[in-house]
Image (cartoon, grey):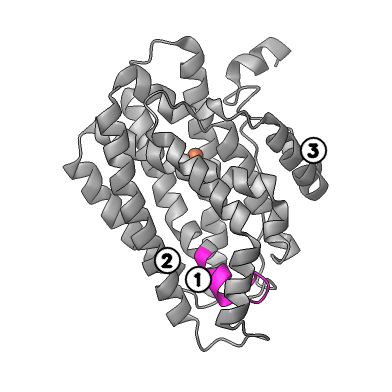
Amino acid sequence: MTAAAQTANRIGTDDIPVRHMDFEFDDSISTFWFDNDPLRTMILTALSGTFPEGERMFMRSVRHYQNNIKDPDLRKRVKAFIGQEAHHGKEHQSFNDMMTRKGVPVDKIDAYTKMGLSRIERFYSPGRVLAKTCALEHFTALFAELLLAHPELIDGVEEQLKPLWIWHAIEESEHKAVAFDVYQEQVGGYWLRVSEMAITTVMFSFFSALHTAQLLQASKDQPRSKRMGLKQRLTGMWRHRDVLAELGKHYLTYYKPDFHPSQKDSRALRNRGLALLTRYVGDKAHISA
Ligand SMILES: [Fe+2]
Ligand SMILES: [Fe+2]
């Protein structure tokens, strides 16, 4: 195949490359893989449990408008967005399967998310579903860029799992504006966008806490080497107060009428993340399908 044909067939763009990771999560990974701490482990595991179905909803919401998109550059970015999200779903599914094999019922979270989202999609207009995708993409970009700015936050994560979170964070930052740009071109409207963000914030917080509690309960009898007291947890949160304030400020920018995800230029952060990912996976960090 010629270089030109290869470029024409490529799903990813230069700014949104579709990387194939093919991670292998073997059973040597501990149940409490985040510093032997059930709480932090299960917060992230619960999130991962919602990813495969959540990302499929993101793809469906954007695909609904795909053929009507006028901007040719946005059309290419939509294909790349769908490519990246499909791979996130695949890799998180394999992580979730590994945790389910260990007796942590992530499969139940997956089934519950599927049921909840299918109801939402039946009840909502396509424009509101896309507004929900934009809201959730703002959340993923918030967490992703927080991690890229402070990779030390996952120092306690087992080495085998760090590339999963770093890779996903880089790509969420790369495609953070795609769903938003489709919304602006095809749907538009400030109140729909921010009202859906308010609803999504409540639902996201409630279900994240609920799923974390369910996984903590289900894994409470599994052996662990250390326990963290309330005082130690509060001290840890106080140490990270600047990071939490940064997260809050970034979240609130979404409510500005002239908000756009690219107003926060995160290229330097992504380059730092890519250097880190290259250390873990080599050239795979730079090869795009
Ligand atoms: Fe994703
Ligand atoms: Fe995303």
C-alpha separation, residue under disc 2 versus residue under disc 3? 32 Å
Q: Position of residue 76 (x, y in %)?
A: 51, 19
C-alpha separation, residue under disc 3 versus residue under disc 1? 31 Å
Amino acid type of the residue tagged 2 in the rendering: Asp
Q: Is residue 263 above or below residue 166?
A: above
C-alpha separation, residue under disc 1 versus residue under disc 2? 6 Å
Dividing the picture into quadrants, the one containing residue 173 is top right
Q: Residue at x 31, y 28 (%)?
A: 64
Stretch of the chain drawn in magenta: 32-43
Classify 10 Å Cα crowding around label 1: few (below 14), some (14-19), many (20 and above). Answer: some
Q: Would you say residue 169 is visible in this rendering?
A: yes
SS for tag 2? Answer: helix
Q: Position of residue 129 (x, y in %)?
A: 29, 37
Q: Which mark is residue 107?
A: 2
- Residue behind mark 3: 283
In the drawing, does residue 119 fall left or right of residue 39?
Answer: left
SS for tag 3? Answer: helix
